[in-house]
Amino acid sequence: MLSTDDYWYKNPEQEYKFNPARLGQAHSWNTDRCQEEMILGTPIIIIDNTNTTSVEWCPYSQMAEQYGYNVSFETPTSPWWTEIFPRIEDNTFTDEDVKVFVEKNTHGVPEHAIRRMMDRFTVVK
């Protein structure tokens, strides 16, 4: 399982230290790790990223095609997610829905950033 979040744990204390100025670098780092696993022929590779738009998941999908991998897009299955997800799909989520995500996130992502992610979420069909 490869997550861009792993980049922020790259310190001896294993503390999560997010730096928005290095987000592009972190995504490139994770994409490079994915390619390394594909070159090695790792049978199953899970990309554990938010991936709210095709710009975010497309590099992984293109690599998968290049290296002969099948791609499956999955969303969480927790009860709170499955309740809110239809409103994210049709962009009718509420302030209360946003607050659920604020409370559930473990990295201190601020409400405005979560709202922005929910606004731009594109469903892959």
Image (cartoon, rainbow, N blue to C red):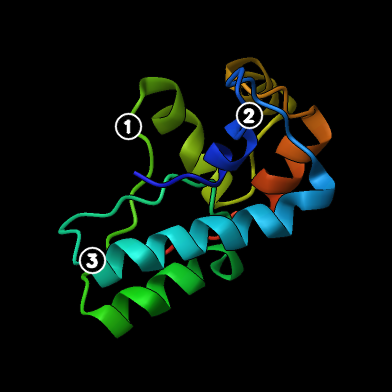
Image mark for residue 119: none
Q: Quadrant of the C terminus?
A: bottom left
92 sits to left or right of 113: left
Q: Is residue 13 above or below residue 22?
A: above
Q: CA distance from mark 1 to mark 3?
A: 30 Å
Question: What residue does disc 1 label?
Answer: 77
- Mark 1 or mark 3: which comes first in sequence? 3
Q: Quadrant of residue 44?
A: bottom left
Q: CA distance from mark 2 to mark 1?
A: 31 Å
Q: Count neighbours of disc 3 (C-alpha within 10 A) and say few if under 14, some if 14 to 19, many if 20 or more.
A: few
Residue 61 in percent (x, y) is at 39, 72
- Mark 3 or mark 2: which comes first in sequence? 2
Residue type at the position of mark 1: Thr
Q: Quadrant of the N terminus?
A: top left
Residue 58 in percent (x, y) is at 49, 72
110 sits to left or right of 56: right
Residue type at the position of mark 2: Asn
Residue type at the position of mark 3: Leu
Task: Using the rendered image of the protein, determine whether residue 16 is visible from the camera's viewpoint.
Answer: yes
Question: Count the marks: how many?
Answer: 3
Residue drawn 30% across and 61% down?
37
Residue sitting nearer the eye, 84 or 116? 116
Image mark for residue 11: 2
- Residue found at the very far front of the displayed protein: 12
Residue 35 in percent (x, y) is at 39, 68
Residue sitting nearer the eye, 36 or 85? 36
Question: What residue does disc 3 label?
Answer: 40
Q: Secondary structure at mark 1?
A: loop
Q: Secondary structure at mark 3?
A: helix
Residue drawn 45% across and 22% down?
80
**Are the two marked residues, 2 and 1, in contact with CB atoms closer than 8 angstroms?**
no
Q: Quadrant of residue 93?
A: top right
